[in-house]
Image (tube, rainbow, N blue to C red):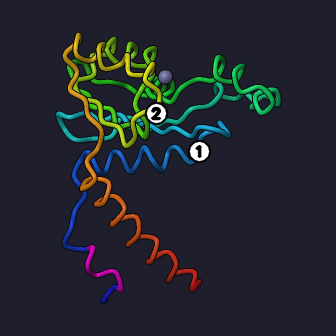
């Protein structure tokens, strides 16, 4: 059957674009009302997704009301997406790992990723504060390959999302 978004069918997302798209969708589950962050962990050896995560509070805990009133307090207490990324997944011994993030990591999360021996890190957006660039020194020191996504990669992600949204829109006849 002919589909309306036929132009998308001969294209394919790269592994980085696919994993970054999953991180972006995961950010939609974030409990943080100010900064929604998503992450995706990939086994590079077999190109399989091991985990996705977002920022929020610990499992089975309600989002505290005080967080909405005091942003600094929330900032100190909330668990970052990278904290949650490694919690519920089994990482095969010796696996080469890649992490795709919606936003570049803070220093603490960069250390967590270095500790897990992550090989490559990609992010859609760079955190817009100079003091948060400490991750670059850590990644250089621990030989982690990293970069922000190119405009072309973001364009490819958008292209697919748009195509899928058109399909979805047609399904519900909006
Ligand atoms: Zn962090």
Quarter of the picture containing the N terminus is bottom left
Q: Residue 140, position in %: x, y? A: 22, 16
Within 8 Å of ligand 1, the CB of disc 2?
Answer: no
Q: Is residue 5 magenta?
A: yes
Disc sitting over residue 96 in the figure? none
Q: Nearer the viewer, residue 129 or 37?
A: 129
Q: Residue 85, position in %: x, y? A: 45, 28
Q: Earlier in the sequence, mark 2 or mark 1?
A: 1
Quarter of the picture containing the C terminus is bottom right
Disc sitting over residue 128 in the figure? 2
Q: Is residue 157 magenta?
A: no
Tell me the residue at 30%/20% (across/down): 136
Tell me the residue at 25%/74% (across/down): 9
Q: Which residues are magenta?
A: 4-8
Crowding around mark 2 (Cα neighbors within 10 Å: few <14, some 14 to 19, many 20+) is few
User: Quick one: which residue is furthest to the bottom in this view?
Assistant: 2
User: Is 39 positioned to the left or the right of 9 in the image?
Assistant: right
User: Is 139 positioned to the left or the right of 73 in the image?
Assistant: left
Tell me the residue at 46%/14% (across/down): 108
Q: Is residue 6 above or below residue 82?
A: below
Q: Residue 113, position in %: x, y? A: 35, 19
Q: Quadrant of residue 45?
A: top left
Q: Main secondary structure of the magenta part?
A: helix
Q: Residue 147, position in %: x, y? A: 26, 34
**What residue sits right under mark 1 in the picture?**
29
**Count of numbered labels shown in the rendering:** 2
Within 8 Å of ligand 1, the CB of disc 1?
Answer: no
At mark 2, the secondary structure is: loop
User: Is 26 positioned to the left or the right of 98 in the image?
Assistant: right
């Amino acid at each position: 059957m002919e589909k309306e978004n036929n132009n998308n069918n001969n294209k394919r997302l790269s592994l980085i674009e696919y994993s970054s798209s999953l991180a972006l969708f995961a950010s939609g589950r974030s409990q943080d009302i100010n900064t929604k962050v998503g992450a995706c962990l990939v086994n590079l050896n077999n190109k399989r997704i091991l985990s996705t995560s977002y920022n929020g509070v610990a499992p089975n805990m309600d989002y505290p009301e005080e967080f909405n009133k005091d942003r600094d307090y929330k900032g100190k207490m909330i668990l970052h997406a990278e904290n949650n990324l490694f919690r519920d997944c089994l990482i095969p011994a010796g696996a080469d790992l890649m992490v795709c993030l919606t936003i570049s990591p803070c220093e603490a999360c960069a250390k967590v990723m270095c500790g897990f021996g992550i090989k490559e890190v990609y992010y859609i957006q760079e955190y817009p504060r100079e003091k948060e660039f400490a991750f670059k020194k850590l990644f250089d020191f621990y030989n982690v390959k990293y970069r922000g996504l190119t405009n072309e990669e973001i364009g490819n992600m958008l292209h697919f999302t748009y195509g899928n949204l058109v399909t979805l829109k047609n399904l519900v006849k909006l």
